[in-house]
Amino acid sequence: MDQIQKTLLEQVADLHDVPAGAYNIRANGESVGRNTTAHIDIVTKTDKPGIDIIIKPGTKKESVHIPVVLSQSGLTEMVYNDFHIGEDCDITIVAGCGIHNGGNQDSKHDGIHSFFIGANSKVRYVEKHYGSGEGTGQRIMNPETRVELAEGSYMEMETVQIKGVDSTKRVTNAKIGDGAKLVITERLMTHGDQYAESEFNVDLDGENSSTNVISRAVAKDNSRQLFLAKINGNNKCAGHSECDAIIMDNAKISAVPEITANCLDAELIHEAAIGKIAGDQLIKLMTLGLTESEAEEQIVNGFLK
């Protein structure tokens, strides 16, 4: 891998070297590195681009890294990655996509990640998106995540997009079983003329199932954002969605939360708030010696943590 690709890897997967455990690293449409373990297997699909990640029941304290980087202008790809996670597991999965576009053609990565999580398993999933390059071609990413949580399982999703992605549509669809829980935390920043759309659809099908969907977003310059969160309470369950956003300059943000109770014992809450940075926050930091732009940066960084 060249230095540009290595830098992208650091940004999206915090990798400075070959990771421990299982991994599959993809660059410019090709696999450039793979490792399996005694408990985690990675198999190339034969019917379409992508991989199957098979995690044996009882696997504990192991990790899987599957980052993708693109440094070739004009490259477009679509991949399908399926995670088959056995019962009683405790694992961390790190994905993410980085695009460096130095040319005048659009570069695009679309991916569908499907998770089939066995009973009483715990999964932490981290997905980061990052763009760089001075070319006029766009950096486009459209990830879709599909989740099926079996009885008593737990999944924590952390999705991050802070810089350099010109256009993205992020879709998450989830079905939650008895006593299972899904927690989603999104951190998103757009600038320039960028557009970002986040859509969450969660079906709380199981008894005592639950979800918590939280989005923290900042829109700068002329960028636009759309947040959609739909939670369906189909059983005795608890669901909560929350969108907090800071709007700056000439940006535009829309938040559209929707909750539907299809059961008498469904308890659902939605919250949404959009506003500018408070003047007293800026003044307080500026009295400490920061310029206005430095104060804004500090506030935004703290908000997105």
Image: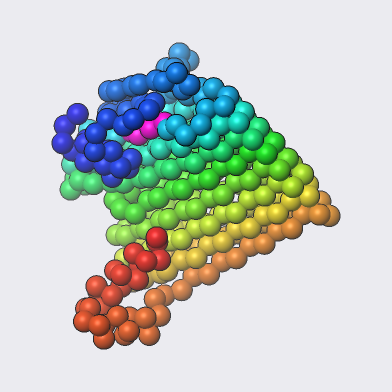
Q: Residue at x 42, y 31 (%)?
A: 64
Residue 6 visible:
yes
Q: Nearer the viewer, residue 191 or 218?
A: 218
Q: Nearer the viewer, residue 83 or 271?
A: 83
Q: Quadrant of residue 21?
A: top left
Relative to 273, 78 lies left or right = left
Q: Residue at x 29, y 80 (%)?
A: 285
Q: Is residue 291 above or below residue 36?
A: below
Q: Nearer the viewer, residue 72 or 262?
A: 262
Q: Quadrant of residue 294?
A: bottom left
**For the image shown, how many numbered marks are present on the structure?**
0
Residue closest to the far left: 3
Relative to 46, 149 lies left or right = right
Region in magenta: 64-68
Q: Is residue 188 above or below residue 247?
A: above
Q: Residue at x 45, y 13 (%)?
A: 46
